[in-house]
Amino acid sequence: MKRLLFLLPFLLCADEDFISHYEYGEMLYNQPRGVNCAECHGESGEGKVIVEFRDIHGKKVLRGPDIRKESLASMINSVNSYHKIMPRYYLTDEEVKAIYDYLQKKNSEYLDESEEGNTTK
Ligand code: HEC
């Protein structure tokens, strides 16, 4: 709700380009239909510990993987399929692309750096 209030000025700027593609991606990443990607994949998709617990086998750590290097095609595929932990989302390809572009832009420095170190590409 706080987020929506923050967006209100953008929404009211009728002569402006509604909200930018980046802001749209940010909004979707942070709240696609109530469950946000950031909760499990971290603020920028870097991955995050969701929960730590202990069972008869000892300590377990449940984490959301780093998705910064995920391709658009595999992101669309992941969001649209069933997983053990991650919920299935009903987002359009356009919406997933906005999330993808948002993460690409947000992590551009990290992605540039790791590309330089990768000589096989
Ligand atoms: C409840 C936690 C949770 C939420 C919310 C969540 N994910 Fe995930 N995600 C996971 C986990 C855990 C995996 C690993 C597969 C599994 O075990 O479910 C995963 C896998 C993925 C993968 C594949 C990466 C890989 O290495 O296999 C992508 C891409 C992805 N998530 C993107 C997203 C996006 C985009 C959103 C928001 C629309 C999202 N996730 C929301 C927990 C979550």
Image (cartoon, rainbow, N blue to C red):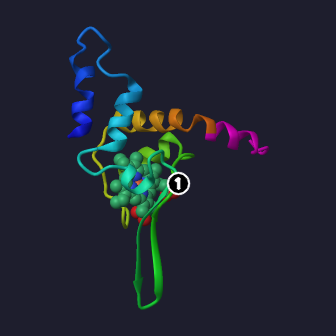
Question: Viewer-proximal residue, 63 or 92?
Answer: 63
Quarter of the render that holds ligand 1 = bottom left
Q: Name the residue: 62% across, 41% down.
A: 110
Magenta region: 110-121
Pointer 1: what residue?
66
Q: How many labels were placed on the picture?
A: 1
Q: Is label 1 within 8 A of ligand 1 (CB to nearest ligand atom)?
A: yes
Would residue 78 be visible to someone looking at this image? no
Residue 112 vertical placement versus 14 (above, below): below
Q: Is residue 35 left or right of residue 79?
A: left
Identify residue type, mark 1. Asp
Q: Name the residue: 49% across, 55% down.
A: 47
Displayed quadrant of residue 3? top left
> Could you say where residue 13 lies in the image, as x and y percent from the top left?
25, 14
Residue 115 is a magenta residue: yes
Q: Name the residue: 37% across, 50% down.
A: 37
Residue at the limit of the structure toward the bottom, as seen here: 56
SS state under label 1: loop
